Amino acid sequence: MENSTIAAIATPGGRGGIGIIKISGSKALSIAAAIFSPAVSHASTHSDRSGAAKNVFADGFQSHRLFYGNIFDPGSRRVLDEVLLSVMKGPQSYTREDVVEINAHGGQIAVHAILELVLRQGARMAEPGEFTKRAFLNGRIDLTQAEAVIDIINARTDRSLLVAAAQVNGTLSKAVEEIRHCLVELLTRTEAGIDFPDEVDEIIDPAAATVEIEAAVIQPLQRLIQQHADGNVLRDGLKVAVVGRPNVGKSSLLNCLVKKKRVIVTDLPGTTRDTIEEAFNVNGFPIVLTDTAGLHDTRDPIETIGIEKTIENVNGADLILLVIEANRALTNDDHKIFKQFRSKPTIVVINKIDLVNHDKLVEMPADWSSSKSVRVSALYDRGMEALKDQIVATAFGENPIGLDSGIIPNLRQKLLLDDSLKAALAIRRELNNGNPMELIAIQLQDAIDALGQILGTTVKVDVLDQIFSRFCIGK
Ligand SMILES: Nc1nc2c(ncn2[C@@H]2O[C@H](COP(=O)(O)OP(=O)(O)OP(=O)(O)O)[C@@H](O)[C@H]2O)c(=O)[nH]1
Ligand SMILES: [Mg+2]
């Protein structure tokens, strides 16, 4: 383990109430002692800086205490800022090393001047994610927890944050650890069977092992893999495409939902030519809404390109809002669009209800009954709450995802879960076929290794670098 002392500004750039400079490593305390002078010293009658400092730090800094005072440049003796200094001695700290945090007044100039001073005292600039990387390398957290720290920083909504926070507490590790435990136990018995072939029947019973693998390995792995798919939505946002024929009010609907004039609206059909994305959130769920070009038969080359993009976008969407007009009977284009995308979860949005009486509303054909419909007026902002509720209900069902278990593997973890599952399925097959124990042991080892990489026990250095480079500096 590298033992250099690292430092960085931990708060975002720009003006703010406070700015924090974080230092971690064996020199953190001596650097702090060299540039900090407490404002009041109970123990000292001297007023000079070094004398006061000596008394307060006579036995070194006390851990997990806040110190109030000034940061000064030991060369020029100039005071740079009034600060609160917090000291957390390792191993009771984020990185398990000695950590000092200097809470300075937020101006960028003061914060940068203090960082520079700290670097001149012998610390080096931290790389992105290096504090968290040290926490991992020093065994305070496992890799899934370190990755969750990134997700917390990037969380788009309250719900995404909830899931990331659960993972920081180790919920995914616990689930993976349980599966791994079962595999390790089976491997131990398999190897005993290899060493004592005469007693193999007593050591390992293939039928019982098959049942065990199924219940304690295959099914839990499959559940975690499924949760990855569900969780992508929380991490990246639910992709919702607004489609319909020209002029039905798709762009108006997007503007109304996101509460700003994001897209151009005119009374001319064919106004929207390109797909336009806007992120917002509904009841805490992140949504990425896309407005698209109106779909119909056309020879206009620009519209044709727009229509191709619409189709491409809809194919990648999780949910479709099919907009129709309340004041007109459905046209062939409406029917065509419904049919074209019928494999996707769809909500029919009956727009422009302000133009018709209730009893004159467009009729929904019987074969559209698989989709729920909501009546709105995008022009007068009516029905939007009902539409939002329907979006959440259609996309997430009764029990919004991720909240019950709080476990959502990311893509890296999911690919390793896939590897582990592949090996587990092979083990089940080989147990059924009565294949030699040696073969089963190899597959068990593969399944265990894949899970080890999730936890970070067997992970490669370049993978680590890649993970931690996604962090911001100062975390
Ligand atoms: N009365 C009424 N007019 C609406 C409503 N929603 C949209 N409109 C009008 O319908 C016309 C078309 O609206 P847009 O939002 O541009 O329709 P679009 O579906 O995006 O049209 P294209 O981009 O051309 O495909 C505009 O004149 C809107 O003001 C509504 O709820 N009520
Ligand atoms: Mg439009």
Image (cartoon, rainbow, N blue to C red):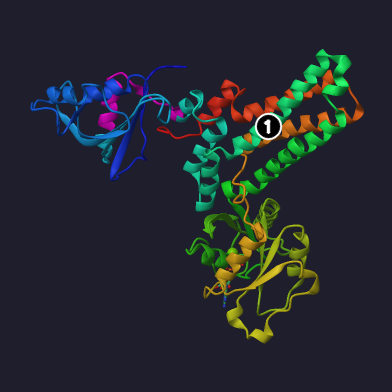
The residue at the point 53 percent across, 64 percent down is 257
Residue drawn at x 81%, y 13% as measured from the top left: 195
Q: Is residue 318 magenta?
A: no
Nearest the viewer among 370 and 52 is: 52
Residue 119, percent from left and from top: 30, 23
Crowding near the residue tagged with mark 1, few <14, some 14–19, many ≥20 C-alpha atoms within 10 Å: many
Residue at (25%, 30%) from the top-left corner?
113
Quadrant housing residue 60: top left
Is residue 422 left or right of 22 when viewed as pictured? right
Residue bearing the label numbered 1: 416
**Residue 139 location in percent, x, y?**
51, 25
**Looking at the image, which is closer to me, 91 or 158?**
91
Where disc 1 sits, the SS reads: helix
Q: Position of residue 158 (x, y in %)?
A: 50, 52
Tell me if residue 403 comes above or below residue 209 in the rendering: below
Up-down: is 154 above or below 138?
below
Q: Quadrant of residue 102?
A: top left
In the rendered image, the vertical position of residue 80 relative to residue 391, given as above or below: above
For the residue pair 57 and 461, the one nearer the viewer reads as 57
Q: Disc 1 marks which amino acid?
A: Leu
Q: Nearer the viewer, residue 153 or 437?
A: 437
Q: Which residues are magenta?
A: 112-131
